[in-house]
Image (cartoon, grey):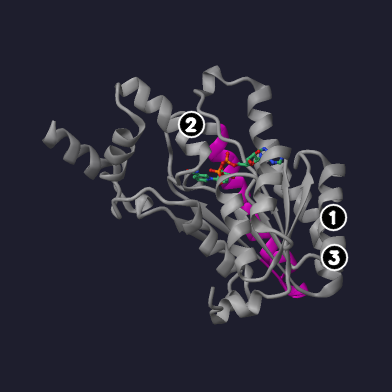
């Protein structure tokens, strides 16, 4: 693949990608490796992790780790530093869990679990990766948040609140570590065709008595760009934010959502009611 300017700048860096065994994380790892970046894939899912690493080849190393466990996060950072021969240049936190549950039905354990993976995980990974980045005087952190941080979805209180917290945490990292040459940004995907979304879509399709493709076509038709995103769409934005091409970009959140956030619920309701 021909190297663009952005890709050339990313060469010879080392990145840590949590959630690298599936969906958006796997797409990010592939995208970075295509630019010559060494990637340390971190995930709880050992078999899927090994598959992605095999696809990427010698630029990938794996670390089976739960991002809610501090020792595991320290181990993941150490693995990346040994693989790259120094501090990691890039940390991309994509590991996350979603939960559709009415607030009155949600247990404290479920609430805490969503926050542990989606907020505490990125905190622990950043805490350990930042030490090397500060020593070296440069680094880029990209946290994968969600459209749910900005717009309400039905019965996703824990998920939405956790992703909004992640956006705020990212902005705070940017403010606190900019003087060390470290940038921090978040990306908020809208609907993206990964195992996480497809699981929810399958349930929706079953309730509506449709097959999955029919259901996804109907959903896509409601979005301004008429398409559900792919992991690669999010990966491209993560790769840009991670690279020196984004040297002046820090503390921002970029929506990658096929225009979904721009939709007004009232206008949508009017259109649906008129078509009904
Ligand atoms: N798919 C979407 O529509 C969508 C939309 C908005 C935001 N996101 C966010 O994008 C990120 C990636 O989601 P995806 O769609 O690729 O989901 P996915 O389920 O395909 O991948 C998530 C990965 O995270 C890993 N993971 C979960 N808990 C972990 C833990 N404690 N420690 C280490 N790894 C763990 C899983 O094993 C899995 O490999 C998530 O943070 C998600 O919230 C996804």
Span of residues in magenta: 158-183
Residue named by callout 3:
132
Determine the main secondary structure of the stretch shown in magenta.
helix
- Check disc 3 and report its element: helix, strand or loop: helix
Name the residue rendered at 12%, 35% in the picture. Answer: 275
For residue 199, the mark is 2
Quote the CA–CA distance across marks 1 and 2: 32 Å
- Check disc 2 and report its element: helix, strand or loop: helix
Residue 22's x, y, as percent?
60, 44
C-beta proximity under 8 Å, tags 2 and 3: no
Name the residue rendered at 27%, 38% in the picture. Answer: 218
Quote the CA–CA distance across marks 2 and 3: 38 Å
Name the residue rendered at 71%, 49% in the picture. Answer: 122
Q: Quick check: is 178 in the magenta stretch? A: yes
From the viewer's perspective, is residue 115 above or below residue 73?
Answer: above
Question: Where, quadrant-wise, is the N terminus in this rendering?
Answer: bottom right
> In the displayed structure, does residue 14 sit left or right of residue 20?
right
Task: Confirm or reject: label 2 Cβ below 8 Å from ligand 1.
Answer: yes
From the viewer's perspective, is residue 42 above or below residue 58?
Answer: above
Residue 113's x, y, as percent?
68, 30
Residue 146's x, y, as percent?
51, 47
> In the displayed structure, does residue 8 sit left or right of residue 181?
left
Q: Considering depth in this image, is 111 or 29 the residue closer to the camera?
A: 29
Residue 112's x, y, as percent?
68, 30
């Amino acid at each position: 693949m021909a190297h663009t300017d952005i890709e050339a700048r990313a060469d010879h860096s080392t990145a840590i990608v949590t959630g690298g065994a599936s969906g958006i994380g796997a797409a990010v790892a592939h995208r970075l490796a295509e630019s010559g970046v060494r990637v340390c894939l971190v995930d709880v899912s050992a078999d899927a992790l090994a598959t992605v690493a095999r696809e990427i080849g010698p630029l990938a190393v794996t670390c089976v780790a739960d991002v809610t466990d501090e020792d595991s996060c320290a181990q993941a950072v150490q693995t990346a530093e040994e693989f790259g021969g120094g501090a990691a240049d890039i940390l991309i936190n994509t590991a996350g869990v979603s939960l559709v549950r009415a607030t009155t039905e949600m247990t404290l354990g479920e609430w805490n679990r969503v926050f542990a993976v989606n907020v505490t995980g990125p905190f622990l990974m950043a805490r350990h990766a930042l030490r090397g980045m500060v020593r070296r005087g440069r680094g880029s952190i990209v946290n994968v948040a969600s459209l749910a941080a900005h717009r309400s979805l039905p019965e996703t209180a824990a998920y939405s609140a956790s992703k909004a917290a992640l956006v705020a945490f990212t902005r705070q990292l940017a403010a606190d570590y900019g003087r060390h040459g470290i940038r921090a940004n978040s990306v908020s995907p809208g609907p993206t065709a990964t195992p996480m979304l497809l699981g929810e879509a399958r349930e929706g399709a079953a309730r509506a008595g449709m097959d999955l493709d029919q259901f996804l076509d109907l959903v896509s038709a409601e979005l301004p760009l008429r398409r559900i995103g792919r992991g690669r769409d999010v990966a491209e934005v993560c790769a840009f934010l991670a690279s020196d091409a984004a040297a002046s970009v820090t503390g921002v959140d970029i929506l990658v959502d096929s225009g979904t956030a721009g939709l007004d619920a009232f206008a949508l309701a009017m259109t649906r009611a008129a078509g009904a």
